[in-house]
Image (tube, helix red, strand yellow):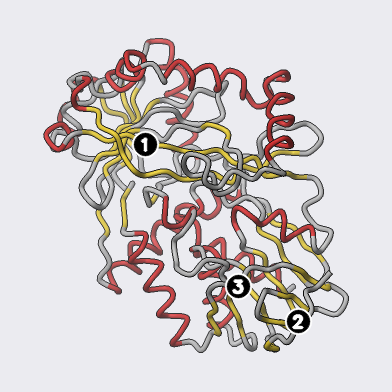
């Protein structure tokens, strides 16, 4: 039920909820196509408060994704777009490259399969021997061979968000901060925030961590639930970081849902370690008790208990691995499988933390590992903007807009 009181009325053709990188790109694509008046709202008072501003902003080359996935479809085009966009706008961007190593003899076969998948998807990758790896990333170690991905890059996330925001101003998009969607009348095509009554013709939901909640106003997304995972980081000391040229990643374990410990050079020059991936008790539960959602915590705990019991998508195996890595000695050994020179004093705390808005299927509790877009009444809902969402944002936005206009 809508709040009573005097509200400012806004009339728009398209209403985009969420000014993360995908929401901004969607609004830009609508304005560029002259589709009518575009309004983009954001519940926070600034850009980059959540996933888009808290990522490492790695511009991925697309090694990992199944050929029939939306991720594979958009990743390469998205990477090319950011390379050109950052050059045009004078935003920091660097092709640091990435190597994927086999941490043990048991992972060599999986690394071979990953290499074949990357080649089949047309990704620019090369095999390098253990000896050849020393010329690419001298401090990295591998068994038998490693994959070299020279096109993997890093960029300034905040610089990109600010530039996109400026683009939208110039295109005449109505941009509003501090505007959280608190109710929608889909039949009347009216959305409400605390201050605005927004009359729209089509609603595009790019609300990220809260996209499933917004979708419920339209009766959409009923097959899915969001399971927030909190990612915390460590970092290498300056001396140790200076010995890492790009990024060093482990061979993915298909029995685990996330990548595990990896070393990533970011645009500031730091080398981060991580992130971890622990269930969070709220969509904005970044630290301590701040962001814990009292009403949702029992639901998250019950869902987590069921996922652990079923080992859905390897969550139980992942949880055991995460708990073991909390031991300093285990964590150090995991880092040393990537870069053996690292010692305990080289690993330092980091303030960086983010939330992965991971979608799960309501029936099987399996993790959904690709982007998900659903249609509703006069609406389009982007429900699973997980990595590499930043990389894919531009071609993904064009796909979303094409779908909305169909």
Q: Which mark is residue 47?
A: none
Is residue 113 shown to the viewer in this render? yes
Residue at figure coordinates x 70%, y 85% from the top left:
7
Task: Estimate the x, y position of residue 223 in percent, counting from the top left.
Answer: 80, 45
Disc 2 vs disc 3: Cβ atoms closer than 8 Å? no
Is residue 99 shown to the viewer in this render? no
Residue of label 3: 179
Tell me which label, 2 or 3, sits earlier in the chain. 3
Residue at figure coordinates x 72%, y 65% from the top left:
380
Residue of label 1: 233
Residue of label 2: 201
Along the line of sight, the residue nearer the viewer: 139 or 384 = 384
Along the line of sight, the residue nearer the viewer: 377 or 216 = 216
| Front: mark 3 or 1 | 3
Q: Is residue 248 above or below residue 21?
A: above
For residue 101, which quarter of the picture? top left
Left-right relation of 168 to 332: right
């Amino acid at each position: 039920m809508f709040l009573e009181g005097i509200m400012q009325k806004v009339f728009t053709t398209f209403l985009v909820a969420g000014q993360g990188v995908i929401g901004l790109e969607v609004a830009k694509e609508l304005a560029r196509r002259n589709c009518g008046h575009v309004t983009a709202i954001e519940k926070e008072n600034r850009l980059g408060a959540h996933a888009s501003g808290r990522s490492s902003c790695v511009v991925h080359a697309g090694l990992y994704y199944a050929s029939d996935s939306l991720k594979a479809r958009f990743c390469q085009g998205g990477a090319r777009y950011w390379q050109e966009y950052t050059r045009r706008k004078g935003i920091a961007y660097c092709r640091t490259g990435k190597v994927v190593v086999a941490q043990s003899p048991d992972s060599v076969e999986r690394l071979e399969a990953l290499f074949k998948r990357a080649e089949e998807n047309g990704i620019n990758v090369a095999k390098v021997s253990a000896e050849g790896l020393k010329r690419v990333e001298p401090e990295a170690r591998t068994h038998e061979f490693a994959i070299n991905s020279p096109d993997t890059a890093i960029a300034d996330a905040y610089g990109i968000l600010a530039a996109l925001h400026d683009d939208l101003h110039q295109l005449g998009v109505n941009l509003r901060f501090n505007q959280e969607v608190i109710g929608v009348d889909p039949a009347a095509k009216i959305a409400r925030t605390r201050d605005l009554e927004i009359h729209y013709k089509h609603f595009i939901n790019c609300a990220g961590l809260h996209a499933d909640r917004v979708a419920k106003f339209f009766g959409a997304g009923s097959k899915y639930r969001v399971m927030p995972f909190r990612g915390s980081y460590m970092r290498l000391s300056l001396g140790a970081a200076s010995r890492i040229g790009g990024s060093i990643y482990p061979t993915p374990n298909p029995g685990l849902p996330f990548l595990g410990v990896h070393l990533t050079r970011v645009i500031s020059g730091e080398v981060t370690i991580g992130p971890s991936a622990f269930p969070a008790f709220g969509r904005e539960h970044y630290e301590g008790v701040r962001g814990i959602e009292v009403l949702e915590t029992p639901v998250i705990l019950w869902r987590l208990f069921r996922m652990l019991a079923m080992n859905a998508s390897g969550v139980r195996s992942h949880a055991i691995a995460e708990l073991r890595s909390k031991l300093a000695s285990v964590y150090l050994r995991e880092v040393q499988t990537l870069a053996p020179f690292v010692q305990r004093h080289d690993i330092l705390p980091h303030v960086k933390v983010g939330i992965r808005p991971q979608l799960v299927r309501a029936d099987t509790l399996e993790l959904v590992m690709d982007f998900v877009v659903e249609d509703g009444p006069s609406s389009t809902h982007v429900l699973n903007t997980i990595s590499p969402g930043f990389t894919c944002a531009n071609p993904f936005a064009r796909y979303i807009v094409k779908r909305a206009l169909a």
